[in-house]
Amino acid sequence: MNKKTTYLLLAIVGFIAPNVLVFTESIETGNILLYTNPLATIEGMFANRISTIFMIDLLFAVLVFFVWTYIDGRKYGNKRLGLVWMLTLLLGLAGAFPLYLYLKEKAIANKGQKQLTKPL
């Protein structure tokens, strides 16, 4: 299996696995995608010291991801950065990170194809 396919499969699993619980929570509480009741979401995210540790770590990782994808995306000409960032904010980093890597590999492959077909 090549890198592109691996990243795509990881993106699919990364979007589905955590969001099964998000959808369950949405149905049970009416807090759709954890956005319609932000106070309850924030209270849950920072309910105790352990969850606070995980949230601070995750929020910092998302910040680093945004900075890195901005720099890296410009380097490789990734045109779908806005989509990746939106999916990160809506559905989480677990799916968006491998999706970005998939899009990066696709951009690299397309760049290589254009150079092969470029007239001398």
Image (cartoon, rainbow, N blue to C red):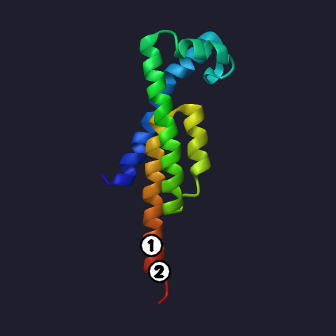
| Element assignment for label 1 | helix
User: Looking at the picture, which amino acid does disc 2 mark?
Assistant: Thr
Would residue 20 be visible to someone looking at this image? yes
Q: Which mark is residue 3?
A: none
| Element assignment for label 2 | helix
Q: Position of residue 78 (x, y in %)?
A: 54, 58
The structure residue drawn at horizontal position 44% and vertical position 12%, both measured from the top left corner, is 49
Q: Position of residue 86 (x, y in %)?
A: 61, 40
The structure residue drawn at horizontal position 49% and vertical position 87%, both measured from the top left corner, is 119
Would residue 96 be visible to someone looking at this image? no
The structure residue drawn at horizontal position 52% and vertical position 38%, both measured from the top left corner, is 63
Q: Quadrant of residue 109?
A: bottom left
Image position of 105 with respect to 24: above or below: below
Image position of 97 with respect to 57: above or below: below
Quick check: 66 left or right of 39?
Answer: left
The structure residue drawn at horizontal position 61% and vertical position 48%, both measured from the top left corner, is 82
Crowd class of label 1 (few under 14; some 14 to 19; many from 20; radius 10 Å): few
User: Looking at the picture, which amino acid does disc 1 mark?
Assistant: Gln
Image position of 35 with respect to 4: above or below: above
Label total for image: 2
Q: Which mark is residue 117?
A: 2
Q: Between residue 63 and residue 89, name the one nearer to us.
A: 63
Q: Position of residue 37 (x, y in %)?
A: 68, 16
Discs 1, 2 touching: Cβ within 8 Å = yes
Q: Position of residue 64 (x, y in %)?
A: 48, 41
Q: Which mark is residue 113?
A: 1
Crowd class of label 2 (few under 14; some 14 to 19; many from 20; radius 10 Å): few
